[in-house]
């Protein structure tokens, strides 16, 4: 029995001895920090990441109670195609992980890092046009896609990241440091960025109450107060609000103030489609959550315009989408002049009105948009006494086609309706921003379809200061001194192609038709056109009383940028004025001839046609040197017979009033067809 006990006790003794030895070895290894595992760990990471990895000593590893790694240095290489020192190089690195966080992790969940500290971190984040990057690893297709790791404690004394991204044209240096509340020191993190982005200089800074709460990835975590600023080219941004869960839902909420030289430059920064404008300032509330960006613009001053709006911006794999409503207390049309290439109207010598600067059709690739426009007041410029109020439309940008549709504009008791399209769908989808400049070589198709109904010209068109003063002296209203009175009706149906305003006008095709209903025209102008010196002197002495226009119609046919007069006449009881000739939109030149046939006798009627020549900026108006007989008018009118169908729809005399202006205009047009006007 005793012998059996001796035999049976030996295995138990050996087992206990082995366990004791193993525990002792583990304890000793724990005390020493497992230094012999440094090289196997390097090889494991190299095989896993397919990158060179180097861990500098002293190296210490703890396995009991969790995974703890400490190394004087950690370096990981970048792919060979990049000429950089490596992807990342950390000094004084300390990492802590809990086994429970590793064992309980689910597919798609982020890794949880209990603590990450480093005295210094340097990273090289480079990306080529083909999408290859220094941070791209050869990943097993079966491995789940995980978000950025959740770091519960982060301290980086000094950090630098060098960014060279060909896709976004970014060359930046980012410096950052964190202090997560050592002792009595408040938690704070600071990020400083400088360099260039999309070929413009960029500088910025963000300061927050610690980095850890921002990266917490906890929907219930408390907001972290953050302030920052950014300078990009001529754009300045200031943010004051809260940022948290930046590696999860990326929640941001606060006040943003942005100002700059042009909204287009802000669009370049954000990679969205904004027009080129005059200087702007925007005050807005912004919020970033799982649904996207919510933007509540309290004030957007662009030049003299005062706008506001609410928008939702969603980033999507194919193309981002901007939705919302844009309103304006006051919108000045000239504030959009830079969008049409007009960027140098105040300085330098100009020989043309319409700019030939390429427009930014390339930016149409950046997003889709569905925006309702509701402007209370639209200032059309100095030539117009009354604004448009209100102006409503629907702006849609879908797959490179921009439309301003369902236009409903009210002005001077009348209306303007229709739509405008710019179709740039022939552009190829860009692979990167560097290719955008090539898209400006493509000429998009344009289409303008507008209808004008019963606009009161007396109220709409501006009056010269001299005639305003004359009205004051005679105790009359300013509108009594209008050169042209009546209700304007018409249609504009034009198409063209071009990547600049000038190219578009050079390619115009279509029709422009206008008719003035119940119209009157300045007697002085009529006599001046007819060069009736005696009558004109009498008007100056007695005063300029408007003359009723029995017919006032205009139809121009556009072909390859040349507007040719089909029908253009003003018929009054005293004179018939006919306009014949061309307007060359490409050359910005006139070649017009006005002929007036007085219906009354005057001993000092010169009766010579008036020629309008020269350019839009330098027109030349002068009578022809050789007087002509009155019969020439009949010949000119006969040449205007083609086609009258564009004007006839606007003439509706009705059945009850055969003496109306419309009925008289019908009669005038019939006489033109018969050749009875001589």
Image (cartoon, rainbow, N blue to C red):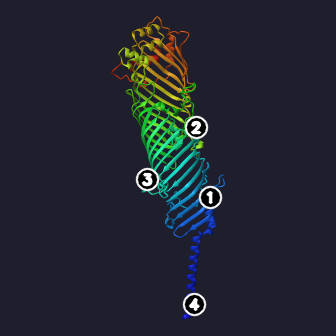
Quadrant hosting residue 550: top left
Give the labeled residue for mark 1: 76
- The residue at the far bottom in this view is 1
Give the labeled residue for mark 4: 7
Quadrant hosting residue 574: top left
Q: Earlier in the sequence, mark 4 or mark 2?
A: 4
The image shows residue 149 at horizontal and vertical percentages of 52, 59
Give the labeled residue for mark 3: 223
CA gap, disc 1 to disc 3?
34 Å
Q: Which mark is residue 554?
A: none
Instruction: Answer few, some or many: residues within 10 Å of disc 2's Cα (few below 14, many 20 plus, some between 14 and 19).
Output: some
Give the labeled residue for mark 2: 440
Which mark's residue is nearer the viewer, 4 or 2? 4
From this view, report whether residue 290 is shown above or below residue 479: below
Quadrant hosting residue 439: top right
| Helix, strand or loop status at disc 3 | loop
- The residue at the far left in this view is 656
Q: Earlier in the sequence, mark 4 or mark 1?
A: 4
Q: Residue at x 47, y 40 (%)?
A: 396
Q: Are marks 4 and 3 in contact (CB under 8 Å)?
A: no
Which mark's residue is nearer the viewer, 1 or 2? 1
Q: Earlier in the sequence, mark 1 or mark 2?
A: 1
Q: Are marks 1 and 3 in contact (CB under 8 Å)?
A: no
């Amino acid at each position: 029995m005793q012998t059996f006990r001796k035999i049976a006790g030996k295995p138990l003794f050996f087992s206990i001895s082995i366990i004791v030895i193993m525990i002792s070895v583990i304890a000793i290894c724990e005390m020493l920090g497992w230094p012999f595992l440094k090289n196997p760990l390097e090889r494991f990471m190299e095989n896993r990441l397919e990158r060179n990895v180097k861990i500098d000593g002293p190296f210490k590893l703890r396995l009991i109670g969790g995974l703890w790694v400490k190394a004087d240095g950690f370096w990981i290489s970048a792919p060979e195609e990049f000429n950089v020192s490596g992807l990342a190089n950390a000094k004084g690195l300390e990492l802590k992980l809990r086994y429970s966080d590793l064992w309980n992790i689910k597919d798609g969940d982020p890794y949880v890092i209990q603590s990450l500290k480093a005295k210094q971190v340097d990273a090289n984040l480079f990306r080529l046009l083909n999408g290859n990057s220094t941070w791209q690893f050869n990943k097993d297709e079966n491995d789940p896609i995980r978000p950025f790791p959740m770091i519960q404690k982060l301290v980086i004394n000094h950090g630098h990241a060098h960014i060279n991204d060909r896709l976004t044209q970014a060359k930046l240096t980012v410096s950052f440091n964190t202090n997560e509340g050592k002792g009595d020191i408040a938690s704070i993190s600071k990020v400083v960025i400088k360099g260039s982005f999309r070929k413009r200089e960029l500088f910025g800074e963000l300061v927050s109450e610690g980095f850890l709460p921002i990266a917490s990835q906890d929907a219930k975590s408390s907001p972290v107060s953050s302030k920052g600023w950014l300078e990009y080219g001529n754009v300045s941004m200031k943010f004051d609000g809260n940022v948290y869960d930046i590696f999860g839902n990326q929640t941001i909420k606060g006040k943003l103030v942005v100002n700059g030289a042009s909204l287009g430059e802000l669009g370049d920064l954000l990679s969205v489609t904004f027009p080129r404008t005059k200087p702007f300032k925007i005050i807005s509330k912004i919020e970033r959550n799982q649904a996207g960006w919510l933007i509540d613009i309290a004030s957007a001053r662009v030049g003299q315009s005062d706008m506001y709006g609410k928008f939702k911006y969603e980033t999507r794999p194919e193309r981002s989408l901007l939705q919302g409503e844009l309103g304006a207390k006051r919108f000045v049309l000239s504030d959009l002049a830079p969008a049409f290439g007009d960027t140098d109207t105040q300085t330098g010598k100009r020989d043309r009105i319409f700019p030939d600067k390429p427009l930014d059709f390339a930016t149409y690739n950046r997003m889709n948009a569905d925006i309702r426009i509701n402007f209370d007041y639209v200032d059309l410029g100095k030539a117009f006494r009354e604004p448009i109020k209100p102006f409503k439309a629907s702006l849609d940008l879908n797959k490179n086609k921009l439309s301003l549709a369902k236009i409903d504009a009210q002005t001077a008791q009348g209306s303007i309706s229709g739509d405008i399209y710019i179709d740039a769908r022939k552009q190829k989808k860009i692979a990167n921003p560097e290719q955008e400049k090539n898209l400006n070589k493509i000429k998009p198709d344009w289409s303008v379809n507008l209808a004008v109904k019963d606009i009161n010209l007396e109220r709409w068109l501006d009056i010269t200061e001299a005639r305003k003063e004359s009205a004051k002296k005679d105790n009359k209203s300013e509108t009594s001194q209008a050169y042209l009175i009546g209700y304007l009706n018409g249609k504009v149906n034009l198409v063209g192609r071009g990547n600049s305003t000038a190219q578009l006008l050079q390619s115009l095709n279509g029709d422009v038709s206008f008719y003035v209903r119940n119209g009157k025209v300045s007697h002085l102008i009529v006599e001046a056109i007819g060069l009736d010196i005696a009558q004109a002197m009498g008007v100056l002495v007695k005063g300029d009383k408007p003359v009723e226009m029995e017919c006032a119609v205009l139809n121009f046919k556009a072909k390859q940028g040349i507007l040719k007069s089909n029908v253009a006449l003003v018929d009054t009881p005293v004179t018939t004025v006919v306009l014949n000739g061309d307007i060359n939109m490409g050359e910005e030149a006139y070649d017009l001839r006005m002929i007036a046939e007085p219906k009354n006798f005057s001993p000092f009627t010169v009766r010579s046609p008036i020629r309008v020549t020269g350019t839009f900026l330098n027109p030349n108006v002068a009578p022809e040197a050789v007087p002509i007989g009155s019969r020439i008018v009949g010949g000119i009118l006969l040449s205007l017979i083609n086609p009258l169908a564009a004007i006839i729809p606007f003439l509706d005399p009705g059945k009850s009033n055969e003496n109306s202006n419309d009925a008289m205009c019908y009669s005038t047009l019939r006489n033109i067809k018969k050749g009875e006007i001589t």
